[in-house]
Amino acid sequence: MTAHVDVLAMREDRARFAKVSGKRVLIYWPHGFGDWVHFGALAQFLEPSNDYAITRFGDDYVSLLEEHATVRTLLSGVRAPGDGAQLGAPHFGLRLKDCNGRRRRITVPPPLDRAVTRFAPDVLLWTDYPETEGRTAFPFHTKARNLVRLLVAPERLDRAALSQPLKNTIAFSPAPDVQSAVDQRLAQLAPPGTRLCVVSASGVTASRKNWGDGSQARGFAAMLQSRSRRWRVLSMDDDALGDATFARLFADLDQPFARVFKALASRMDLFVGIPAGPLHFVLARGGIPTVGLWLAHHPDWYDEPNVAAIHLLGAGVRELGFDRRPASLTKPHAHAHRLHFLDSHSIGALDAMSAAQAIMT
């Protein structure tokens, strides 16, 4: 049955949360898949005397942090991301402005009610995860690092190795049973002896980030397969620009998205994508040749550098001055991304193909 739990409700402002210690903290994280990936970079800085659990309405994303060393996941029983309104209590009955350090009573619907009641939180943290758009300087130059600055006590930050690229703390290894199920589906698409390229050409937050109308993505897939018959192309989007789409190939797997994507990543030979959740995951995981496609943002604002990645930036990125913002200018060489600025506003199939060849040689 629905539970009502009294907590101190906080957000990232005014350094209130940075002073919390020795408490049981429920982190409410109603953000996108990429932001869940970035949480894996900031989690290591949280006050260690606290006990942490994390959740949202949407187990597709919550499952990404399963098996994390310090933060337990609480599944909501809702597969697709939402705000819980369909269960009668959007955002646990809270508004973000209610998270002002005062005691609030949250409404937790089943089946999440039992998990939250067992965890017995003292504090709820709900941050709006502010978008800095490159305006914070090194070492707080990425979106995740900036939130670390807001959530962590200054004395802890003074001892942190922020001068080095941050290792993501997500457990990237898939569960064996999920890997087996994914491999069975992949055998239909990419049997032994073939190579798998995954393309993510569109996202859900801003259409300006997308790789055009899909024609360049389809052109890239055709170009890749013309170079070698061994390549198979899987689209993360609804449009089957290559051999199959993620949704259709794995439609009958009764598993949250993040579990399946972890298993899929272990079989990728190449990833090409815009700045959305799948790209951020692949960059954080490492070990996969990757081409990032940037038309409306700059990679320095979001991700730690990855030696297996090349980022293509459309001319609009420079015209908007994104390469001159503090996050893009103030970093030492150890934090440099491999960037290639284009003269055109679009990213062509040949541009992506040339970058893919460069990163795989």
Image (cartoon, rainbow, N blue to C red):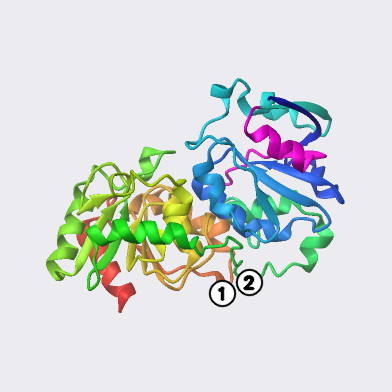
In the image, taking residue 87 as reference, residue 107 lies left or right, namely right
Q: Which dot marks residue 164?
A: 2
Q: Is residue 298 visible?
A: no
In-front residue for pair 164/345: 164
Write down the residue under mark 1: 334
* Chain part drawn in magenta: 109-132
**Residue at 75% from the left image edge and 36% from the top image edge:** 117
Of the two numbered discs 2 and 1 on the same chain, state the one appearing first in sequence.
Answer: 2
Identify the residue at image location x=51%, y=67%.
305
Q: Are discs 2 and 1 less than 8 Å apart at CB?
A: yes
The C terminus, quarter of image: bottom left
Q: Is residue 28 visible?
A: yes
Q: Secondary structure at mark 1?
A: helix
- In depth, the one of 314 and 217 nearer the eye is 217
Q: CA distance from mark 2 to mark 1?
A: 7 Å
Q: Is residue 119 magenta?
A: yes
What number of labels is visible?
A: 2
Residue 82's x, y, as percent?
Answer: 52, 31
